[in-house]
């Protein structure tokens, strides 16, 4: 029998060393395989979780953020039209009047398209009812503004000034 000292312990013959080596190598390979398997499972879970987070983010964006941005833009364009209509009463510069009229017309067209875009984002019936109210108010505001613009185009300034409180009441 051949006795060998390894790490302070005496070991048996070569056959015993080979068996011990085979057991240890199997344990080592098994441990590495288990670690790799666990890493693969964790990476698959992280990819799946990332996919779910991305889907939820897109849903949030389409369901809420787009609608809010459309309403915000509607608000700013309507506010511009309100002040521009009132400014038309007091400006004497022809270029400024033309610019204001063009901007009001462009904003009205954009508001119509924004209303259509916003209506497509509505999912809840309560929001649809609020949308109808908002749409009616915007149409009333547009009609009152158009009335003032028509009176101004006919140089009926006194009547246009008399129509401003109607515009103010709608706002």
Image (spheres, rainbow, N blue to C red):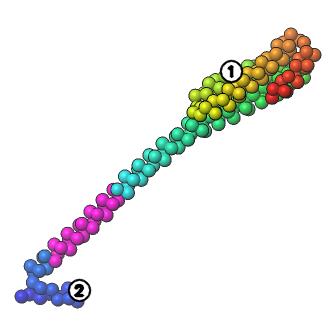
Left or right: 53 in relation to 43: right
- Residue 2, compared with residue 50, is above or below; it is below
Residue shown at the point (39%, 53%) measured from the top left: 45
- Residue 134, compared with residue 144, is above or below; it is below
Q: Position of residue 59 (x, y in %)?
A: 52, 39
Residue shown at the point (57%, 37%) measured from the top left: 63
Which residue, given by chain and number where applicable, does mark 2 sit on? 7
Q: Position of residue 60 (x, y in %)?
A: 55, 41
Q: Position of residue 55 (x, y in %)?
A: 48, 42
User: For the view shown, which residue lies furthest in the top direction?
Assistant: 154
- In the image shown, does 25 or 41 lie closer to the viewer? 41
In which quarter of the view is residue 158 placed?
top right
- Residue 51, compared with residue 124, is above or below; it is below
In which quarter of the view is residue 21 placed?
bottom left
Magenta portion: prevailing SS class:
helix
Magenta region? 20-40
Q: Nearer the viewer, mark 2 or mark 1?
A: 1
Which residue, given by chain and number where applicable, does mark 1 sit on? 109
Chain-order first, disc 2 or disc 1: 2
Q: Is residue 5 magenta?
A: no
Figure quadrant of the N terminus: bottom left
Figure quadrant of the C terminus: top right
Helix, strand or loop status at disc 2: loop
Residue 149 shows in the view: no
Residue shown at the point (13%, 76%) measured from the top left: 19
Q: Mark 2: few, some, or many residues within 10 Å (few <14, many ≥20)?
A: few
Left or right: 149 in relation to 15: right
- Residue 66, compared with residue 33, is above or below; it is above
Residue shown at the point (90%, 12%) measured from the top left: 156
- In the image shown, does 26 or 120 lie closer to the viewer? 120
């Amino acid at each position: 029998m051949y006795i060998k000292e390894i790490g302070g312990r005496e070991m048996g013959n070569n056959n015993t060393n080979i068996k011990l080596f085979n057991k240890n190598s199997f344990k080592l390979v098994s441990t590495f395989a288990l670690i790799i398997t666990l890493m693969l499972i964790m990476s698959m879970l992280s990819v799946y979780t990332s996919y779910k987070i991305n889907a939820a983010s897109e849903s949030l964006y389409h369901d809420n953020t787009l609608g809010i941005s459309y309403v915000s833009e509607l608000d700013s364009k309507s506010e511009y039209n309100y002040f521009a209509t009132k400014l038309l009463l007091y400006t004497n510069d022809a270029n400024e009047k033309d610019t204001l009229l063009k901007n009001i017309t462009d904003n009205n067209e954009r508001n119509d398209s924004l209303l259509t875009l916003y209506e497509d984002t509505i999912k809840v019936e309560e929001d649809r009812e609020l949308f109808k109210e908002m749409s009616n108010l915007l149409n009333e505001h547009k009609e009152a503004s158009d009335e003032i613009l028509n009176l101004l185009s006919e140089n009926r300034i006194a009547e246009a000034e008399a129509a401003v409180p109607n515009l103010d009441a709608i706002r």
